[in-house]
Image (spheres, grey):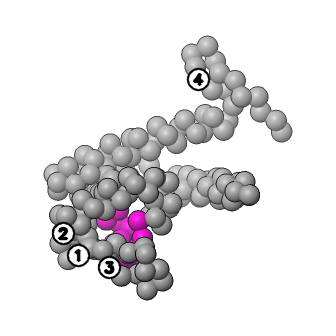
Amino acid sequence: MYYNVTMRSTGEPTDPLSKFSLSVFKLNGLLMRNGDNITKSIGQSSARWQVLGRIGYEPQTVAKMARDMGHARQSVQRVADVLVNEKLAVYQANPADRRAQLLGLTPKGAKTLADIYAAYGAWSQHIMTKLSPEQLTAAAEALESIGQILETDINNNKE
């Protein structure tokens, strides 16, 4: 089925993909602002939380984190450098690629990440009084499906 991409006189899109995209952009902004509120008392930010959270599972290269997060490598590099300067993260040798170091969590970084997750847990409980787990699971699955379609499209157009 073909959808015509048009806007209402208010500037609001009428096609489903544009409406969806604008909703995701708005939701991302709201999640980032809430993340900043959660991390502020710990002296961190959503951007730092994202990087700490990624290396909390396993050390990663800045380039991989940037790709996975959909950010410019330079912006993730700036955050990584700040985390290293604050002794929350450390660069370490990468056995798979000597030129691309891995960013890993320090004990101080692990403590900071644990503090962030504790604050997040309280916020999460508050939000979950307004949503059901089923709603969030269905939304997450839909987003993952759309993400797979978009990723496939990007990979097919690299040529």
Amino acid type, callout 4: Glu
Q: CA distance from mark 3 to mark 2?
A: 13 Å
- Kind of residue indicated by mark 2: Lys
**In the picture, which quadrant includes the C terminus?**
bottom right
Badge number at residue 12: 4
Q: What x and y, as percent, mark residue 7?
A: 65, 21
Which of the two labelled residues, at mark 3 and mark 2, occupies the earlier sequence position? Answer: 2
Q: What's the residue at 31%, 52% (across, down)?
A: 46
Left or right: 58, with 41 as reference point: right
Q: Is residue 75 visible?
A: yes
* Circle 1 SS class: loop
The magenta stretch spans which residues?
A: 50-62
Q: Residues within 10 Å of mark 1 (few under 14, many from 20)?
A: some
Q: CA distance from mark 4 to mark 3?
A: 48 Å
Rendered image: mark on residue 51 = none
Q: Residues within 10 Å of mark 3 (few under 14, many from 20)?
A: some
Q: Are marks 4 and 2 in contact (CB under 8 Å)?
A: no
Residue with the mark numbered 1? 106
